[in-house]
Image (cartoon, rainbow, N blue to C red):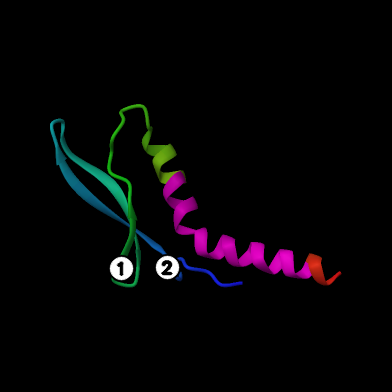
Amino acid sequence: MDTKHTPGPWKIIEVTSDTASGPTPYPRYIAGSVTVAELPERSPLCMMDERAANARLIAAAPELLEALIDMVESVGAA
């Protein structure tokens, strides 16, 4: 299978943006020196614990893809 994503591991770093309500932290996802994604605060409805859970899920994407590919291959071999 030919994948076209940025290879992992992806890491989460916290960066800060100046907003009208003051400095606001948000996650940035990096692979080496490459920024894979950023999720700046856009909605007060998104709670910090939900943002942290989403950050962990996004950072795990390369490993989740690898596990899925392994599972599909082993089911196909059965």
Question: Cα distance, mark 2 to mark 1?
Answer: 9 Å
Q: Is residue 47 left or right of residue 17?
A: right
Q: Pointer 1: residues within 10 angstroms few (<14), some, or many (20+)?
A: few
Determine whether the residue tagged by mark 1 lies in a helix, strand or loop.
strand
- Decide whether the magenta segment is chiefly helix, strand or loop: helix
* Quadrant of the image occupied by residue 41: top left
Span highlighted in magenta in the image: 54-74
Expressed as whole percent of the image width and height from the top left, the position of residue 44 reads 31, 28
Q: Amino acid at mark 2?
A: Thr
Expressed as whole percent of the image width and height from the top left, the position of residue 59 reads 45, 58
Q: Residue at x 32, y 46 (%)?
A: 39
Q: Residue at x 28, y 43 (%)?
A: 40
Between 41 and 48, the residue placed more toward the observer is 41
Q: Which residue is mark 2?
A: 6
Q: Is residue 34 left or right of residue 55?
A: left
Q: Amino acid at mark 1?
A: Val
- Looking at marks 2 and 1 on the same chain, the residue that comes earlier in the sequence is marked by 2
Image quarter in which the N terminus is found = bottom right
- How many numbered markers are drawn? 2
Q: Which residue is mark 1?
A: 34
Residues at discs 2 and 1 in contact (Cβ within 8 Å)? yes
Image quarter in which the C terminus is found = bottom right
- Tell me, yes or no, whether the highlighted magenta stretch contains residue 55: yes
* Quadrant of the image occupied by residue 45: top left
Expressed as whole percent of the image width and height from the top left, the position of residue 22 reads 14, 35
Q: Residue at x 20, y 48 (%)?
A: 16
Q: Residue at x 39, y 63 (%)?
A: 11
Between 50 and 29, the residue placed more toward the observer is 29
- Tell me, yes or no, whether the highlighted magenta stretch contains residue 34: no
